[in-house]
Image (cartoon, grey):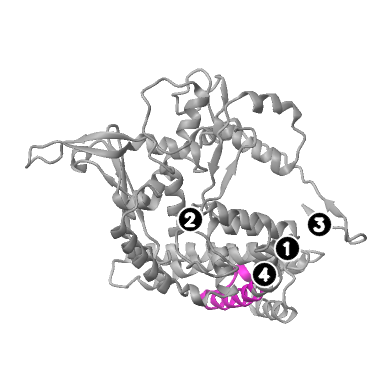
Amino acid sequence: MRTTNPDDPSSVITTTTNFVFSMTRHVAMELCQHFMDARYIRNALDPSLSFFKDKSLHCLTPKGLHVLESFIEKTGIDADHLQPVLESEIICPNLFYVERESAEDNIIFPYSSIIALFRWFVGKQPNYSSKDCLEPPLLQHKQSKGIGLQEVIDRSGLLSRKAVQRQYCFDAVDALEWLCNFTSVSGREEAAQVAAHFERLGLIAFVGNPEKYNNQAIVFTVHGSPDDQGCDLIGRTQGEFWCANKVYYQVTDKGRWVAGWDFNPALKSLCERESEEIDEKAGRVPRERVTPTHRLHYILREQSYRSLFRAFLHENYCEEHILYWLDVDAINRKFNVTSSAISGATTNHSSAYDTQVRQDRKKHHQALLKKAVHIYKSYLHPNSQFELNTDYTLRNELFRFIDTVSLSTNREKVSGSGADLEDRTARIMNCNGEQLQNLMTQFNKIQGHTFRVMLMDSLPKFVQTEKFIALQQQLGDMNIKIAGADSALLPGNSGAFISHSYLVN
């Protein structure tokens, strides 16, 4: 952790924390299996094995080497002994990092992230599989250009008795493997969730008759979130991805247009109308009325700009502003979803059902309280790790409210330097539903103040940086042109948070 030296503001104090992990053999085996599922390691003797085999040799995959290289570069640790390995082995050239929640680490699927990931998945141009046997470095490079495509004969049209040749098709199992190898998904289940969202938005479509695979396919189902910036306007609320041998999907006309392969005036007009509907529902404004407030909202919502903005704030020792804003945004979304689920529950059910509803309600409530405690301990308690330099009045108002929450009668009195923290943590965990809602109101007030600080102090400097300008140029016409505000704030144009290997040309 880097902090400013109080005696010399021009210098920085770096604090290093060492962690020692202790685990049983069984837990270690499970952890290694997670590494295999995420494609960080593989069996060196039999790469086709999907399970971690005890007393066998294993090695890092190109994806694992990429993550290791990025970690070394980011932390600046002494790793000279690893340089020969990194320079001689095949490394994944680029890796797409999916967006995740800060607490549960689940993948977040806003419309913009799905579109960015889909473009990464299919590549800038159709990547038809080569029948030639390529050397491993060339094969890795070719595969990194996008999922391998092929032409497939579709014989599902039984009435016409006519086979149809489908273009731009890919194997379902190959798609999951590609996503595991070239994105940060942690296994096939997360990869299937990603692919199911592609299908939900109409970017890919099943080839043939799904009923043929009813008894052998594993079907992954996803649902569109009601606060997903209007995604229900441009796709279905439910998507499916069927996974089995000889199951194929095709990149649709809409998918090819979104990927930038084809120019289709009809699709362009349709997508522009959809974008206008999404803008209206999401509260966006036409380009002639874009303000700095709208720009900052866009940067915070869109993945690639947000990642760059967070790095900028970290360099300027005020990263806690965006971290707090994101954590409060996450708990707000979780609170709204939970509240919607609870309000939808009725009493016209059996006693067993009502008992389950009450248990689920209590579980959701406890999860929200734990998240609230995390926010308080990380940002708002004096001398916390990422203490916010927020408004004095708002902070005291929060403290006064927390102190009004009653404590459990059987709780022991705590004294010492950490008494205030323990006391307020216990009070937050003892909040009922109404008190939790009031606590959320306090968090939101401080979030609004934090937003204004970023708007006034950080945004004007950020948009003048070379990295921000370079990112705009990289995204081409799908970006925010801050200076002239001559580009509409279209959804799905966030680009991608991509890690590049500096050892790969």
Percent x, y of residue 447: 62, 72
Asked whether residue 433 is drawn in magenta, I would say yes
Marked residue nearer the N-terminal end (2 or 1): 2
Label disc, if present, on residue 219 of the rendered structure: none
Q: Indicate whether 501 appears above or below 369.
A: above
Distance between mark 2 and mark 1 Cα atoms: 25 Å
Percent x, y of residue 40: 55, 33
For the residue carrying disc 3, how many other residues have a C-alpha within 10 Å: few (<14), some (14-19), or many (20+)?
Answer: few
Residue type pointed to by label 3: Thr
- Range drawn in magenta: 428-451
Residue type pointed to by label 1: Cys
Q: Which residue is mark 2?
A: 108
Residue 362 horizontal side relative to residue 28, left or right: left
Residue 205 horizontal side relative to residue 290, left or right: left
Residue ranking furthest to the top:
45
SS at badge 3: strand
Marked residue nearer the N-terminal end (4 or 3): 3
Toward the viewer: 247 or 87?
87
Distance between mark 1 and mark 3 Cα atoms: 10 Å
Marked residue nearer the N-terminal end (1 or 3): 3
SS at badge 4: helix
Q: Which residue is mark 1?
A: 318
SS at badge 2: loop
Residue type pointed to by label 4: Met
Residue at position x 25%, y 34% from top? 152
Label disc, if present, on residue 454 of the rendered structure: 4
